[in-house]
Amino acid sequence: MTDPGSRPAEPQDSPPIVEREAAAAPSPPAPSPSAPAARRTSLLVTFALGGLSAVPPLSMDMYLPALPEVTTALHSPAATVQLTLTTCLAGMALGQMIVGPMSDKWGRRRPLLAGMVIYVLATALCALAPNAELLIACRLAQGLAGAAGIVIARAVVRDLYDGVAMARFFSTLMLISGVAPVVAPLIGGQILQVTDWRGVFVVLTVVGVLLTLLVWRTLEETLPPGRRQSGGLGGTLRTMRDLLADRAFAGYLLVGAFAFAALFAYIAASPFVMQEIYGASPQVFSLLFGINSVGLVVVGQINGKVLVGRVSLDRVLGIGLVVITVAAVALLLMASGVFGTVGLVPMAAGLFVLMAAMGLVMPSTNTLALLRTPHAAGSASALLGTSTFLLGSVASPLVGIAGEDTAVPMALVQLACGVLALVCFLGMCRPWQRGESAMDEQATDERITDEPAPVEPATDGPAADKQPAGQQATERTRS
């Protein structure tokens, strides 16, 4: 019998193959008793990928309540301690550019596990750091290693899913990654009630160990050797150059980055704006922050369960960008006094609408960008992640340039980001020229269901030459 991995490729609906398979299995098989186990495994993989996506907010936001205590305990100025945040953010941006191409060359599993192990070690060293300088260095290492989870999680989703199924899966991941920024500061504050700032890193270390074990036990290799990239640094640079030369991919990259910059502007400015300008108490601000995050998650689920598969992905993205821009215009008009003196409720409502619209934009941009890059999902994911972190880090300080008595800078930054995202979408993505809706419909007709079945992962062995069903469907869609 010929090895399936070595026989020539034939159309999936070729009559000879169908006849041979029918002869090999003359009667329909009985339902497999292991089907429920496969479903449970799929849920565990979803949880693992969601946990990997939640690593950045957990690493950043859980530590925020401890900053004043760190300043006192390490006898360092506040500006120095602030570098522990900056270096972690920079490490996550740079680490994605390193790990993403590595995962295209060596597969997803090994770089991911190596990154998670280093993340655990770096986080444990943060808990033991005797001075601010060593803490800064460990936070940089923590960010570099933690980037593996962010970039490879997106690449794994691209390996396993295509079309609207990928958009639905990204929306599902928001259930986990969207809640993390809400609960992380609360968890950090509760930890400080029973221990000092080092206890925050101890908890992060435990979380990292548990997540590493979950990934090791449930997430198998999803990139077969036959689909991996070859070449060294030169090949990596050529791949990224080719990705950025794709106008539509670059457009979706910029759309997602500018939208995320508007989100970063909200995160950076909202504590000051809501409490100092509009008089919200810390408890009310925490409640509003949580409501906005819940709105993002709920709209993301509506997008994944209701809109995706019925409405074109590009149309969903366009609607989300328009809503963000309109909400930013309303916020700017209220902040600048066009409507007179407005209170906390109208501003909070405007921010809620802007945040909720992110649930339409974020899954759609990731999906539409990665749809164009089945050959280099790791490198594409790295570019997507790094661009969002870089633009977000630029937008965050801009919200305070006009002093402490106005919310106009926050609204201006958000409006500029929304307008630039729309310009990139219309000027670079141009979905009406590429027939993207037709591709969505084709993918839907071929194999998309409301609950897409998990794809059998590839392994680093003889069976690795067999492509997962998601990749076969990708090639059929591409052709």
Image (cartoon, rainbow, N blue to C red):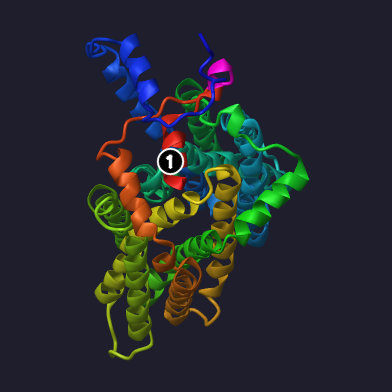
Q: Is residue 362 above or below residue 23?
A: below
Judge from the rendering whether residue 173 lies leftward or rightward of residue 420; answer left or right: left
Residue 326 appears at what percent x and percent y? 33, 77
Q: Is residue 457 above or below residue 450?
A: above
Q: Residue at x 66, y 52 (%)?
A: 240
Q: Residue at x 43, y 82 (%)?
A: 408
Instruction: Tell me, yes or no, whether the highlighted magenta stretch contains residue 462.
Output: yes
Q: Which residues are magenta?
A: 459-464
Residue closest to the eye, 127 or 392: 392
Q: Is residue 179 above or below residue 419?
A: above
Residue 168 appears at what percent x and percent y? 33, 45
Q: Is residue 227 above or below residue 182?
A: above
Residue 45 appears at what percent x and percent y? 41, 30
Q: What amino acid is at disc 1?
A: Arg
Residue closest to the eye, 179 or 223: 223
Q: Which residue is mark 1?
A: 476
- The secondary element bearing badge 1 is classed as helix
Judge from the rendering whether residue 106 lies leftward or rightward of residue 170; answer left or right: right
